[in-house]
Amino acid sequence: MEDATTMRDKSILGSAPQPALVQVDRLGVSFATRNGTVQAVSNVSFQVAKGETLGIVGESGSGKSVTSYALMRILDRAGRISSGDMTFSGIDLVNADERTMRDLRGREISMIFQNPRMALNPIRRVGDQISDVLRQHAQAVGSNARVKSIELLKIVKIRDAEARYNAYPFELSGGMCQRIVIALALACRPRLLIADEPTTGLDVTTQKTVMELIVELTHERNMSTILITHDLGLASSYCDRIIVMKDGAIVEAGETSELFASPKHAYTRKLIRATPRLDSTVRELLLEDLATAAKPTKAARATSDVPILQVTSLTKSFAPEIAKRSLWLEKLIRSKSIKPPEAPLAIDDISFSIPAGGSVGLVGESGCGKSTTSSIIMRLLEPTVGSVKLNGVELTDIPIKSFARSTYRAQLQMVFQDPTDSLNPRFTARRVIEDPIRMLGSDEDRKCIEERVEQLAERVGLPVDLLSRFPHQLSGGQKARVGIARAIALSPKLLILDEPTAALDVSVQAIVLNLLHDLRADFGMSYLFVSHDLNVVRLLCDDVIVMRAGRIVEQGNASEVLASPQSPYTQTLIDAIPHPPSLHAA
């Protein structure tokens, strides 16, 4: 006879198929800190059936990853399981000794970690790392390990697997590193796969490929999967059931279709509302009270037909740099003993313009040339051929070393993709924002600079009392605001936004997108918005440029291109975007 707790959990979590491979009951996880004990996870209960995909969604700090680390028993030294039970195929995971857990990890339970480059050993070949896992769990011996590792690389669709076996992580793209991590996780044919944000930072087509690969292998091997994500579109497309976590507790759970059709909890409705969809506007992403409090949407559009940025016939090849990496290779080329190495063009004869006050989106897969283009415009890279004019001034005529202190540098600023890595960890938020004013601004006295920094903080919605904090003491959204405040400190004419919201939770992303929209309308700045999220581009950009393999395959009005693309490649990008179901109740 079932007790009340079991019946309650079933009613909350929906009817998961039986028997359960994983059973978590009233799990609690706490961490010892210098300020006392912090309860990270409280009273969490769920189960995962064989062959089922369970989604755990929520924002940063909700307890998603901590729950999975507890399940794997890989909490750091300060963390401990304070209450509850966890079983895997009848094995008590809470009380199992470390030897048992080492045997289970990798062989029975595997994990795809969020950051593939951090998960891989940077000084070991990727093939050797897969072989290590196989040998550790007696799945291969000697030279057989290499053969099996290459087979795994082929399973995860790594082209030229034999050659890639000897590659180091830094020689591979983000998408390829993610596939290597998937190969590591699947090496011993586990029964449970935990995928922790497996597609964060990947372009939409690579994201679709990775997720379809996980789903295909899950069905093929009858594995169970726990997908941890803050992307509700991803969860709605690939999960059988979903649990929503907030502040370390489950606030809602159920079958995927039912949860999206009729969400019960306000937090679930907030997450769904904040996720960009094909029919949403930038204001609709905010909570109802924030959207009401926000000032009316001011039309942000180009103020002139005269381009503030004109890029003409831009081409970039890295072939000379490849040769210079090796002295002996360079000598052989000079002696004509061998031909120079041929390298594909990173950028191949592209031309576009941005009107004053306009916003142009630059989209495409990883490796298409987006970042190379923005780096050349920022004078961080020298083009092989081509012209870059800012307000009619040829920027390529200014040496890169001199450009950092050029008067034109103040007119051209950048917001970087990772708000954490782009801030100096030794600078307070105040120092970060005032740094460009000191370097390139006018000779203002200390008091004037302080007042200006506080005005900038207020403008981007950063509380003034946070200016004395260091980056590690700020949330992701607060760090993003610091980066934006720094970028607009000198009132630039052109702002290059490199995936500024890719690493943010959807609710924080909604606030940052609204901030960027308002700043452009208020100050008449021009944007070059580099992104792989076409829904975000549609919300912020007048025009869009689609790049593939260094070339522009399509460009035009953003709404028209996304509604009726002329290039099959653009259509492929659009089709790859996971969309959550429309929410009428929210």
Image: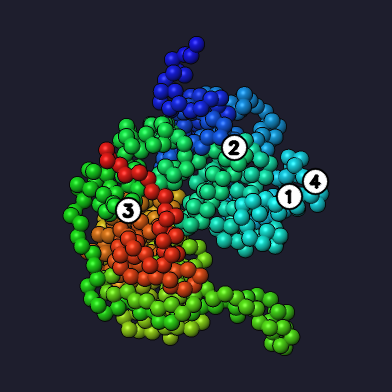
For the C terminus, the image quarter is top left
In the picture, measured across the screen, residue 63 lies left or right of residue 170, that is left
In the picture, measured across the screen, residue 89 lies left or right of residue 520, that is right
Q: Earlier in the sequence, mark 3 or mark 2?
A: 2
Q: Secondary structure at mark 1?
A: helix
Q: Which mark is residue 223?
A: 2
> Real-space Cα distance between discs 1 and 3?
43 Å
Residue name at image x 71 percent, y 60 percent: 162
> Amino acid type of disc 3?
Leu
Residue name at image x 75 percent, y 52 percent: 147
Q: Which mark is residue 278?
A: 3
> Real-space Cα distance between discs 3 and 2?
33 Å
> Amino acid type of disc 2?
Met
Q: Earlier in the sequence, mark 1 or mark 3?
A: 1
> Real-space Cα distance between discs 2 and 4?
25 Å
Along the line of sight, which residue is nearer the eye, 513 or 108?
108
Q: Earlier in the sequence, mark 4 or mark 1?
A: 4
In the rendered image, which residue does mark 4 sit on? 141
Q: Earlier in the sequence, mark 4 or mark 3?
A: 4
Q: Secondary structure at mark 4?
A: loop
Q: Nearer the viewer, mark 4 or mark 3?
A: 3
